Amino acid sequence: MIVRYAVAMGLALAGVVTVASPLGAQDGVYRRGVPDTVSYAHYTPSQCLAAIRRRIQVSRRMQDDTLRFSEAADTLATDVRRTARACLAHLSAEAADARELLPLIPAALVADDSVMANAVVRRIVNGARTPRTRADSLKTVTLASMDITIRPFPMGHLARLFAQIDTMHGPAAVAARVTAHINLGIYYTLMRAADDSVGVRQLQQGLSEVGMLDSAGKKQTEVWVGMGRGMLQLLTMMDGDSMPDRTSSVVHGATILGTAGVKPAPGKVTLVVFQGGTTRQSVAAIRRLHATFGDKVDIVFAAKTLGYFKLRGPLSLADETKTLQEYYGSELKVPGTVVLEHTELKRRFDDRVLPQPTANDSAFANISLVIVDGKGKIRALYPGWGAPLEARVERALNKVLGKKG
């Protein structure tokens, strides 16, 4: 449950402002080398934010991940800012519909328009008539400013909001501080390559006031508190004493696609990469880790059958095994061994096929990477994949190997 809380945070944070994509048939403007010629004159703030998010996704996918992540290089592409500015050109904080104010905040921050972002914040907060609604408004605009899909976070803008929240009094202010600090802690621990202590301090600060929450505040912050505690547990799993003493082979009932034996090998440190952590970006990072550690660390990619591959299917087990072997070996060129776990498929009454949870799904729900030491103990778990994880995994492997890093 704790792990699920820790993983769910990405979706929860990304859903601070949820809007439908307005692009439809205009998706073609995002192809490589084709200029952005969309007219945004009729776009609402929500539609602008959807267009900006789409541009960010495409821009990042078009950039080859050949370099290790660094915070200094984690900036929004020029075409993203250009799209944001073009879309906001006809909008203003004063004239926007009150129901459309929140999407204006992250959109304005992407456009580097702090004047508009601050004007929206003032309009929302000044509209609050009681201390409770003012605290709630501050919490809402702070969460809108921490849109996880748009990084890096605008730290100067957030510092001003946090300064207001931290000086407020009353039950609603406590709930606002708990939520804001936990969110910022999660951002640091998942999206930054900096030392974990920065994120830990934010998580601890948010959790330190949980005991002062009233009943309404407990209900409002229940999910965030669970996420914060789950993230802290994941971070402290590197302490050694709190390691779960699992001595299983981690990869259960797998068919080997490579030539090596079933891993993890006794006495070897192993990095297990589950299917959720296998992307073109993560494979590039894992290749660099392989170059750094060589034969000191075994790498295992744990895949599973689904009865189809991309848009091809249904596939027999033999056909899918061959397809995955070509995908991992010839296309992704992954380092290490690939093992394939067979997924049982059941049909519903309406003939839909439902993949049943595998042994690894049950043991490592929502986990993408696992580090296992030479004694078979799990030393670290990582949900999801983000480029900053490369530095974290490298530090963790150095620690398990007894090196400074």
Image (cartoon, rainbow, N blue to C red):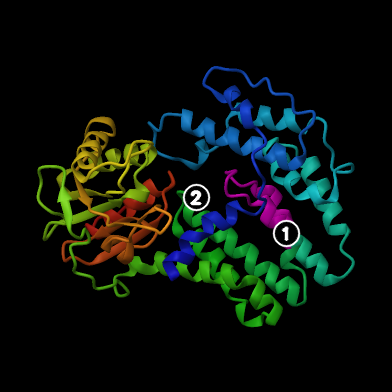
- Give, as a three-letter code, the residue at label 2: Met
**Circle 1 sits on which residue?**
140
> Left or right of 79: which side holds 70?
left
> Left or right of 9: which side holds 166?
right
Label 1: which secondary element: helix
**Circle 2 sits on which residue?**
191
Which one is closest to the eye, mark 1 or mark 2? 1
Q: Is residue 150 magenta?
A: yes
Label 2: which secondary element: helix
Q: Residue at x 58, y 58 (%)?
A: 184
Determine crowd level at label 1: few under 14, some 14-19, many 20+ residues with C-alpha closer than 10 A.
Answer: many
> Left or right of 360: which side holds 204?
right
Q: Residue at x 60, y 69 (%)?
A: 206
Rendered view: 262 above or below 55? below
Quarter placement of the N terminus: bottom left
288 and 12: which one is in front?
12
Which secondary structure dominates the residues rendered in magenta?
Answer: helix
Based on the displayed image, in which of its 4 quarters is residue 179 positioned?
A: bottom right
Instruction: Return the x and y of residue 55 as percentages of the image width and height.
Output: 59, 32
CA–CA distance in space, label 1 to label 2: 21 Å
Q: Is residue 263 magenta?
A: no
117 and 360: which one is in front?
360
Rendered view: 369 above or below 151? below
Q: Residue at x 81, y 48 (%)?
A: 120
Instruction: Return the x and y of residue 39 as percentages of the image width and height.
Output: 74, 24
25 and 189: which one is in front?
25
Stretch in magenta: 139-162
Instruction: Return the x and y of residue 343 as percentages of the image width and height.
Output: 27, 55
- Give, as a three-letter code, the residue at label 1: Thr
The total number of labels drawn is 2
